[in-house]
Amino acid sequence: MGPGPISADPRVLRAMSAALVGQYDPAMTGYMNEVMELYRGVFKTQNEQTLLIDGTSRAGIEAALVSLVEPGQKVLVPIFGRFGYLLKEIAGRIGADVVVREKEWGQVFTPAEIESAIREEKPHLLALVQGDTSTTMNQPLEEIGALCAAHGVLFYTDATASLGGNDFRADEWGIDAATAGLQKCLGGPSGSAPITLSDQAVDVIRSRRHVEEGIDDGSTGQGVRIASNYFDLSQILDYWGPARLNHHTEATSMLYGARECARLLLAEGMDNAVARHALHGRAMAEGLKGLGLTLFGDTAHKMNNVVAVHIPDGINGDAARAAMLNDYGIEIGTSFGPLHGKVWRIGTMGYNARKDAVMLTLAALEQVLRTGGVTVPASGGVQAALEVYGA
Amino acid sequence: MGPGPISADPRVLRAMSAALVGQYDPAMTGYMNEVMELYRGVFKTQNEQTLLIDGTSRAGIEAALVSLVEPGQKVLVPIFGRFGYLLKEIAGRIGADVVVREKEWGQVFTPAEIESAIREEKPHLLALVQGDTSTTMNQPLEEIGALCAAHGVLFYTDATASLGGNDFRADEWGIDAATAGLQKCLGGPSGSAPITLSDQAVDVIRSRRHVEEGIDDGSTGQGVRIASNYFDLSQILDYWGPARLNHHTEATSMLYGARECARLLLAEGMDNAVARHALHGRAMAEGLKGLGLTLFGDTAHKMNNVVAVHIPDGINGDAARAAMLNDYGIEIGTSFGPLHGKVWRIGTMGYNARKDAVMLTLAALEQVLRTGGVTVPASGGVQAALEVYGA
């Protein structure tokens, strides 16, 4: 019940144990095409170029940034938590001219603040986290795409922690590139990073197409070469597209898992999945308040799938987390940087966005708090949660 | 039965469906430590830094090269097939000064040729493929480490296609860095790249340690920063080490799979596994000759786990491959570049290094050859294979 990775859906794990097929077996390329279509549904996009990067969620981030941004181009990163710093870090490593704006942890940016920064900095690309689990804040994105379009800025968002549990609309919100991971609201294991790219993003990427030596058909050699082979989206698009250009060997079992994550979500309906995360997230938050704890941050902008609470006085936060894990088999998290040891973070995401998971966590936490010396109302957590559930 | 990826061992796939545990759960960090020890056995090394990169085999290559080589440093790549070009490509993308030597496809380099190139080029690092599936050649490495040490050159080898099926001795052969993948002789799916690093390689990497902003403890800032966050081995070592520095979220299911691959190989014994690949590889090669086909290349240096044969006159190579797949459910490959459409490549690796797999493939190929208009001796393939098996 931490901020992710979370327990994967058993159906996803079963899907991953299916027999492998060859890299260019029609069954395999059929699965790849199916995965593209499934993730169009998950991202709410018509983008042809919607596929998987073979690595964890930050592999998706790096693939997007290294392919969309040339060394020296300006990237604007509004930072409201640890994962904003990660975008800054990754963009900096690939040689971008990175400029940032920073928000106090626990807050989000207004569209006006972002527009003002765009006017001042005139970046090539805006890189903005949607849900930053370090603070539990969910940055509103609805108006950002139009701002970027008006100023000729590419708009990339990291939806790793938010996708599937919070509203996300790639096309409607004018997002040029978005990446995610399976290990949060999608209910799978870490190791595959879904990505979607607008036509405009694809044009930027294709302008840098350099097919690797050994399989080059002579069509290569334009633009500034992407400084990574593994994350070269121009080649990866050709591997997922009709050209079936040889690049990496697709991580077949992870693809099976990613496929099942999307199938389950789309069968449920994306809006229903978001509503489920909202319900169980609210039950968890109210339950924690019912235990006398104080929520962290601007809760009007809290992600549905994770909540942070101030660790109460008189208890050792790490000892309490250890007791939750060792005595009750439930993992909860702390956070990074300024919040390390100050808050606990508790997730309700993916397969763990369930009533029994919420109730058991609140029941166990009540025991751990009391044993740790904190005065807690008996059954205050589970009663508050049950009220949310309408029981 | 292609050159890989191959059918994974069902035991590996079952291991991958185990429930996930949290990223810093003592069970998970225990598994990580266990994986490090297991792969020391697989690589035949005492290297403390033996771990997994979360991506396909070329992710391991890029992690090694981008972390060991600074832009402008010279890398020498002796090329004897498509995957030598891949090393050149990856090293070039990261800004290395790449120099190459090239061999006709189907041959390997002598130690004297490599020493001569080292003397002429004085590279920072030698990057050499062990087994190049594009030509099926297995480059002898026994003497190369000593040559590199004598000249102060770091020695990296790509053992993706060879490890587990051909002799490999990281320590005895003086290898500073080696990477692999699961989808060949290790019997697993693509998506995790085992890597081992000598103390000397670790020193080079640690000299470039820059902890990412957001979690930096102030200990950072030496050397030329590695131009990738995802492949920054200095941080990845700290994630796998006692510091447990937050970096990516380990791909847990892939780690379970990698762990099971190594457990199975070590239970069999690495030398026994190599002998198994040699036996079934010889049976396949003799069987193909028994069908009247001609082997490609310097067979004295053929990898145990894959064989290439010239496509005989009078048959459409791609149609025959399609018939193998569609009528018999068996995948075989062609090759790249100068060998595309000229040879078929047939693997006997990992879970497919089995007598029944060899016999069925030869039986089916006999039918496909005859149907395609090639005159083949009745049962010539399976009889020749049975002689190898001593039946």
Image (cartoon, coloured by chain):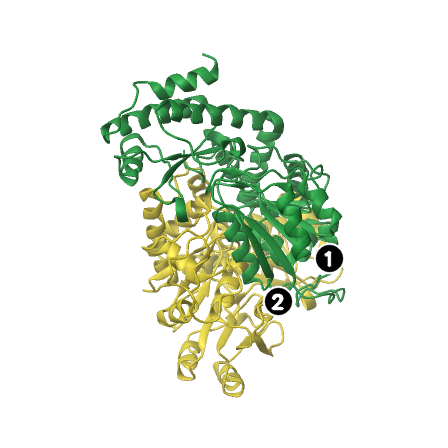
Chain colours: A yellow, B green
Element assignment for label 1: helix
- In this view of the protein, which residue sits in the foreground, B296 or B284? B296
Q: How many marks?
A: 2
Query: What's under tag 1, amino acid-wise?
Result: Arg
State the residue position of label 1: B206
Q: Is disc 1 in the same subunit as disc 2?
A: no
- Can you name the residue that lies furthest to the top here? B391
Q: Residue at x 66, y 52 (%)?
A: B118
Is residue A319 visible to the viewer in this orientation of the structure? no
B183 lies above or below A147: above
Does A329 sit left or right of B79 as displayed? right
Does A140 sit left or right of B373 as displayed? right
State the residue position of label 2: A82
Dot 2 crowding, Cα within 10 Å, few <14, some 14–19, many 20+: many
Q: Residue B1, located in which quarter of the rendered image?
A: top left
* Mark 1 vs mark 2: in front: 1
| Mark 1 belongs to chain | B
Does B209 sit left or right of A69 as displayed? right
Q: Residue at x 63, y 46 (%)?
A: B114
Query: What's under tag 2, amino acid-wise?
Result: Arg
Is residue B8 visible to the viewer in this orientation of the structure? yes
Does B243 sit left or right of A221 as displayed? right
